[in-house]
Image: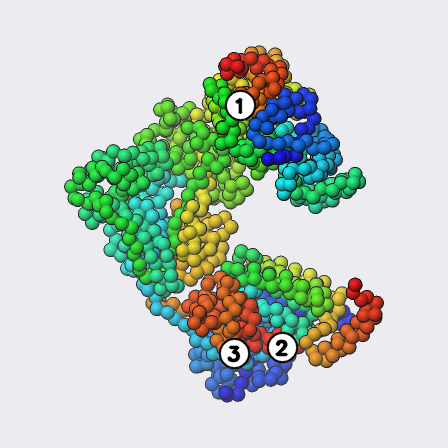
Amino acid sequence: MPEIRVGVYICHCGSNIADKVKVAEVCDFAATLPGVAVARDYQYMCADPGQELIRRDIQERGVNRVVVASCSPRMHEPTFRKVLESVGLNGYYFEMANIREHVSWVTEDPVAATRKAKALVAGAVGRVELHEPLEERYTVMNKTTLVVGGGIAGIEAALKIAASGNSVWLVEKEPSIGGNMAKLDKTFPTLDCSACILTPKMVSVAQSENIKLLTYAEVVKVDGCVGNFQVTIKKKARSVDLAKCTGCGICTSKCVVKVPSEFDGGLAMRKAIYTPFPQAVPNKPAIDREHCRQFVVGKCGVCQKLCPAGAVDYDQVDEDVTETFGAIIVATGYQQMDPSVGPQWGYGRHENVLTALQFERLVNASGPTGGKVKMKNGETPKAIAILHCVGSRDVNYHESCSRFCCMYGLKLAHLAKEKMGGEVYNFYIDLRCFGKGYEEFYNRVLDEGVHFIRGKGAEVITDRDGRLAVRVEDTLLGRWREVPVDMAVLSAAAEPRADAERVAQVLGIQRSRDGFFLEAHPKLEPLKTATDGVFIAGCCQGPKDIPDSVAQGAGAAAEALSLVTAGKVKISPVIAGVNEERCSGCKVCVPLCPYTAIAYDEEKKICRVNEAVCKGCGTCVASCPSGALSVKHFTNQQIFRQIEEVAAV
Amino acid sequence: MRYAYYPGCSLKSSAYDYERSTRAICPELGVELEEIHDWNCCGATAIPSVDPTASAVLAARNLALAEATDVNGAEAVTVAAACSSCYAMLTRALNYYREDPAMRGLIGQALAAGGRTLAGTVKVKHLLEIIVNDVGLEAVKALVRKPLSGLKVAPYYGCLIVRPKGAFDDAEQPMALDRLLAVLGAQVVPFERKTKCCGGALMTTKEKSALRLNEDLLHEASSKGADVIAVVCPMCQMNLDAYQSNVNTAYGTHYRMPVMYFTQLMGLAFGLNERRLAVGKGTVSHAAVLKRMGV
Amino acid sequence: MSGAEFEPRIIGFLCNWCSYAGADLAGVSRLKYPANIRIIRVMCSGRVEPAFVLKAFAEGADGVLISGCHPGDCHYLEGNHKAAARARMMERLLAQFGVEPQRFRLAWASANEGEKFAGIVKEMVEAIRPLGPFRRPFARMDDLARLETEARKDAEPAAGGETGA
């Protein structure tokens, strides 16, 4: 092994460091440290002349290890590694001493600052001698992206990827894409029709050559890692051959079984062979086998007999499809809380208490009443209550704010007022009108004569006359009130979907305390997850309105594209490994790994680290009783040496 | 099933009909009640607001005595309380003792002064909970000989039985009594104000407010066609029953709404003699109920 | 100056993602805190072995800090939970060695808690200063020999006074 020759470079950072740390003194000190061949100080090490100093010393003076004492490695470590690599030295023969953020900027006394800087430099010099050359690793990227969930966020992500010329699969659990947005009537604050702006996008999905659309399908298994996810998708038996079906609708019109329509929130009936809504994509039916007479009783066959295309196929079975993807975008959305969990709101007990999504259907021209606001008895209500924060901002249900209810509460108030006249009451804790044009919309609704009562609707009961009444503590009047109405609309909390836990497990992503999927960083990595190559968009991460969901869908597409178009994916060389001779196979490390990267080899009776999955945290290393595990670049020897050196000054 | 029975002051005086009917039905259900020896006040009424510690200590002494009750070698003693107020006070004291170290210290000290200790292993249940959950509705159903067919009953729980939250039923819209009455064959009317305050505690200090609350309940029950209100608490019974004439005077109403303990209705359904159940003791006559049942 | 006052030497193991970034933020925010800490970067607080802590004390540190992401925020999902479990074990172990509890601390500091990080260092320095330098009861051979003699001396009267029943 050649002699170790360390080059030490102390940066002034203009006056940022030099004003507090006596740079020359640190430099002289560094020169006395064992192994140091060159020690210099310079104005700006990160600038070109500074970098050039290092290059020259490596080439001309045989420097083969480099220490730069300047700012935080979180800032310039990659810069200096590139300098080393540019002259053929491995980038990991480098160490930084952080004498700006951790010394000059936080210390009053120059003497103390100088001493601390010396200690950190000593630590870095001691450590760098033990560094090993590490190679960046790459794996080949599969070019296809998988988007899970066909709501507006997933649709947007798929369209953006398709537009770039890359291929993408869109998997949707329901018979049609569209998600919750398809159920909405108008959208706040501009009041444009939800279907009118959504359906063109849905049609584009169906028409795009780069999008493979799988509806009535679910992701059931994901193996592998970034660049090469092997995904198994279960295509549920639709009982209709999509290739043959022309979408003529004869089957649906002749079907004799009626089932409450999920799309209409149970306010209308659908058939057992059905398309969820008129603009569905694909606009072809599926058979609901739980209710279809052919499957329940074993005889009927009407739709099959009448289908002119011969597309109805009772013998279809669930089918697993396996495909490899480079990246995955999860956009599985949210669900509205079932407000019957809180009997005080009267949902399920009083027939004219509706959820907000049900009311959306009621005011929608293609809804069960043709857009007329009607009570169960067919009469038009004279007064409507809209209760905000039903199950949101409430520690008994969901502590968090559902974010878009304030605005749709205002929108529904406007629509109710417009369609039926009468009185409309909003019961609210606070009104959070945070978006562009939102506050203006609130003012508009105020001017329309909608009532706002500041107080959380505590109960919906029938009053002495048998009419519905909302009981509330009006916190502006400081009084308890009972407000009689004919219909109550509950802005029930947006909550994680019932299958969120299963989806998280299948995809290997985390959930935050509220149950929604967890992003890699709350500010700077809102679309990434802790699992490389898996991104999240839209309401599966937390409640979002339409513009935010669209932005996230597009953003996630950019994230995925930046990966798949690179062709290869870089993996940090800082990973753990097992010294097979030392490993006793005790398996202490196996359950500690959050990524299940460690597996026990039954044949050799030892544990092994899967290098493709390991992230290099080193938790396993710290647990290994026989010292068989180690993590590159943070070995015990390196850290012990660093401890010795920093403690000695 | 053997329980340490805590009757409380009401059941030994104004609510003796509650105790009589309880004593009558429990043997039928296989429920043995061993009255706690030397029990004292549960610490309710004004005491908690004047001296919360004293209130908790009073309740805790009963729990300490209960732990010494012979329950045929069952691993833990369960206290049966029929009065909702007693039930709430005993539960609260037990929660304090288990969860608040400071209160635990104070209670322990006070009990020690009287030579007693509380292990905290005891459980507290309301009679309704015991019947619905421990005995079970299937067993109750098997005992019904004279179903309450055609009798419209408003199930009234009052404010205490489902508090603190997390008790044996939903705090806002409990269903245990509804289900029990249905098993007895009664027609249970949906009673929305089933947990709303009856005004009991306010009747002597804020009569106007108390009568208002009282009338709300009587109004809903009668407007829904109830023949009788079933109650689980002696305070509710007294308030709704004995003050009904005051309500009628104050509001110009003409309520004649019988207010009976659920135990009395159970006894009637079991075919027990109404005298054993002290039926007819109420201020508002129970005759209409008996007539409807053909007794 | 402060020459008379004892300046404890503290070694801090900071995770790369939260606490090291938090210490960077303290710098960027120009928060002043005592220069007594020497920071060693690790990728995760879960990487910190008990041996690192013992090594630090053996090498002359007067205090050791481990700092990582708040529970639930760990970049590696749950390494900080492992660190917390080990820290509880370390506290017991260090107590057996006669290390005062003030000398060892596990503290959570996120990337946006520069102020908190500066506060932690201040608190530790203030807590350790009155204790004086750490006596290193282990690891140095000369110390071991001394301790052994002392222990033998300590054991003598006890052996005569209290024998088990």
Between the residue at mark 3 and the residue at mark 2, the CA separation in whole angstroms equals: 15 Å
Say whether disc 3 or disc 2 marks the residue closer to the N-terminus: 3
Viewer-nearest residue: B170 or C47: B170
Estimate the x, y position of residue C94 in percent, counting from the top left: 68, 67
Q: Quadrant of residue A348?
A: top left
Indicate whether B60 appears above or below A234: above
Q: Tell which tag, 3 or 1, sits nearer the viewer.
A: 1
Three-letter amino acid code at the position of disc 3: His
> Is residue B142 toward the left or the right of residue B98 in the image?
left
**To which residue does mark 1 refer?**
B270
**Secondary structure category for the residue under label 1:** loop
Between the residue at mark 3 and the residue at mark 1, the CA separation in whole angstroms equals: 87 Å
Estimate the x, y position of residue A82 in percent, counting from the top left: 45, 75
Three-letter amino acid code at the position of disc 2: Glu
Q: Quadrant of residue C34?
A: bottom right
Between the residue at mark 2 and the residue at mark 1, the CA separation in whole angstroms equals: 88 Å
Three-letter amino acid code at the position of disc 1: Phe
Viewer-nearest residue: A418 or B177: B177
Question: Please, which residue is most extreme toward the left here?
Answer: A308
Which chain letter matches label 1? B
Q: Quadrant of the C terminus of chain A?
A: bottom right
**To which residue does mark 3 refer?**
A131
**Secondary structure category for the residue under label 2:** helix
Q: Residue at x 45, y 40 (%)?
A: A337
Indicate whether A154 appears above or below C5: above
Q: Residue at x 67, y 28 (%)?
A: B7
**To which residue does mark 2 refer?**
A645
Indicate whether B126 appears above or below A404: above
Residue A531 in sight from this viewpoint? yes
State yes or no: discs 2 and 1 in contact (Cβ < 8 Å): no
